[in-house]
Image: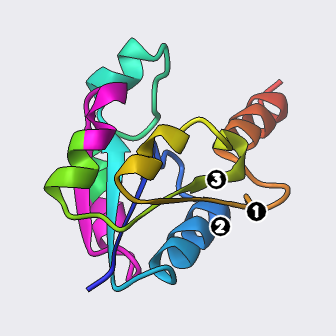
Amino acid sequence: MKKVITYGTFDLLHKGHVNILKRAKEQGDHLTVVVSSDEFNALKGKKAYTSYEDRKYILEAIKYVDEVLPEHTWEQKIDDVKNNNIDVFVMGHDWEGKFDFLTDYCEVLYLPRTEGVSTTKIKEDLKEQLK
């Protein structure tokens, strides 16, 4: 079995999220999605609109996702890859090069993001509409 892993906050789930999950799943047989916990987001200076538990619940309902785990630190990626017998690490191309250190443990792929949609853009658009 070929195992794939990806990471993200997955707040305000949108088409771009589903696209990356679908394309990540196409890389193997089992997709693990590691989701930033609320505490980790706080450490990064971010605040998700949706709680970790709700984001996890939504992701578990997506047919491409086989398992959802929490992300608590930047440093846990090597352990996640090793402990879950991961073959392929997938991230959006906006992270290109940032996780190349994982090539000692698995294949690293950076996939193109879906054009024109992002959680940041959704939040900005909503803010603009409320003015």
Q: Which residue is mark 3?
A: 92
Mark before the other along the chain sequence, 1 or 2: 2
By what rule are the colours in the image chosen?
rainbow
Mark 1 surroundings: few (<14), some (14-19) or many (≥20) residues within 10 A = some
Q: Which residue is mark 2?
A: 15
Residue 105 on the magenta segment:
no
Q: Residue at x 77, y 32 (%)?
A: 124
Callout 2, which amino acid? Lys
Residues marked 3 and 2 touching at CB (< 8 Å): no
**Image point 85% across, 55% down: which residue?**
116
Q: Quadrant of residue 129?
A: top right
Q: Are marks 1 and 2 in contact (CB under 8 Å)?
A: yes
Q: Earlier in the sequence, mark 1 or mark 3?
A: 3
Above-or-below relation of 106 to 35? below
In screen coordinates, is 20 left or right of 101? right
Look at mark 1 in the image and give the residue it sits on: 114
Please tell me how crowded label 2 is: few (under 14), some (14-19), or many (20+) other residues with Cα within 10 Å. Answer: few
Residue 59 located within the stretch drawn in magenta: yes
Task: Write the residue at 83% across / 59% down.
Answer: 115
Q: Amino acid at mark 1?
A: Thr
Place residue 18 in its image quadrant.
Answer: bottom right
Q: Give how far across and how far down residue 76 sits, in percent.
A: 26, 34
Magenta range: 57-78
> Residue at 80% across / 38% down in the picture?
125
